[in-house]
Image: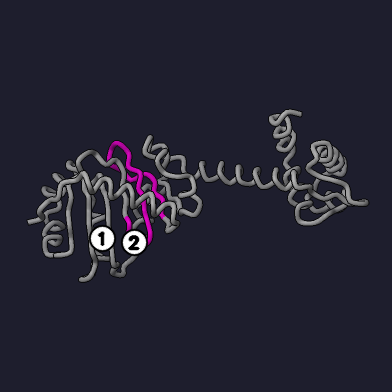
């Protein structure tokens, strides 16, 4: 068989991957396998025959066990299955980020929490952000936002303590909205000597918050709605977020909040 044919053989029956998993754990006889994975004996025998032909499995007395090649196939299949499942969860998030999503290393998504707005819960990403941020003062808050939102303002207010160092890069259009619609938020910001505000040099297009060692990224649609978000504290996500933030800050213009 060619590689595509081998893959087709593996996924042609739902129980074949399960058979490999069982044999990876310990050698088993066909009757034991049929019982463990709830497959017909005929299906088990056909699968084992194909596994042996592909050298994924070898006979050990009356039992069968995986070979090194079989272990490799199983590991790569499970990795692919996990990637496909994660891509499905991230679909809306990645679509809204567009080309920006290609800059995020795939490893950054391994341990993140994903939240997507639905018709039943359109505010799920915002509620998740508020929960992720918490209510206790933080040491450091660095953020980027393409929108002006009283919900985000309130969430940030809850975690700002007297020792919190805060920087915020805001889209130019969002800053105009803030000045007109949320002057009280800017007034409170003026009272914080440790707060630095920047006007973005170019449209941002997504939200980003780096709070102490954790990161939250928000995907925003063309109407300014937060439609999906991810958050986590993995090294890959943190390193990407820090690099993106610093690049935007280097090009941004510092704004007086007075």
Q: Compared to 98, does 133 lie above or below? A: below
Quarter assignment of residue 103:
top left
Q: Is residue 78 left or right of residue 48?
A: left
Q: Is residue 143 left or right of residue 181?
A: right
Task: Residue at 13% x, 44% y: name it.
Answer: 176
* Percent coordinates x, y for residue 105 in the rendering: 45, 45
**Residue extent of the magenta highlight:** 210-231
Asked if the stretch drawn in magenta spans residue 200, the answer is no
Task: Residue at 45% x, 57% y: name it.
Answer: 234
State the residue position of label 2. Answer: 133
Dot 2: element: helix
The answer to whether any part of residue 212 appears in the image is yes
Quadrant housing the C terminus: bottom left
Q: Main secondary structure of the magenta part?
A: strand
Pick the residue in front: 222 or 84: 84
Query: Contact, CB < 8 Å: mark 1 with mark 2?
Result: yes
Quarter assignment of residue 177:
top left
């Amino acid at each position: 068989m060619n590689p595509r044919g081998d893959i087709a053989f593996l996924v042609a029956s739902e129980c074949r991957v399960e058979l490999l998993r069982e044999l990876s754990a310990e050698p088993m006889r066909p009757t034991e396998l049929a019982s463990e994975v709830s497959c017909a004996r005929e299906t088990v025998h056909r699968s084992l025959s194909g596994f042996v032909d592909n050298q994924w499995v070898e006979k050990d007395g009356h039992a069968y066990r995986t070979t090194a090649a079989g272990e490799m196939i199983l590991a790569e299949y499970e990795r692919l299955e996990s990637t496909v499942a994660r891509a499905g969860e991230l679909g809306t998030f990645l679509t809204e980020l567009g080309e920006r999503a290609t800059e995020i290393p795939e490893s950054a998504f391994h341990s993140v929490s994903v939240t997507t707005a639905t018709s039943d819960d359109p505010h799920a990403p915002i509620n998740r952000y508020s929960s992720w941020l918490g209510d206790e003062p933080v040491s450091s808050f660095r953020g980027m936002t393409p929108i002006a939102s009283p919900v985000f303002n309130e969430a940030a207010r809850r975690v700002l303590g007297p020792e919190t160092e805060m920087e915020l890069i805001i889209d130019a259009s969002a800053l105009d909205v803030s000045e007109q619609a949320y002057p009280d938020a800017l007034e409170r910001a003026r009272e914080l000597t440790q707060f630095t505000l920047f006007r973005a040099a170019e449209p941002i297009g997504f939200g980003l918050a780096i709070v102490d060692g954790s990161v939250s990224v928000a995907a925003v649609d063309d109407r300014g709605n937060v439609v999906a978000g991810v958050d986590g504290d993995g090294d890959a996500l943190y390193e990407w977020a820090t690099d993106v933030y610093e690049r935007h800050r280097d090009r941004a213009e510092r704004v007086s909040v007075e």
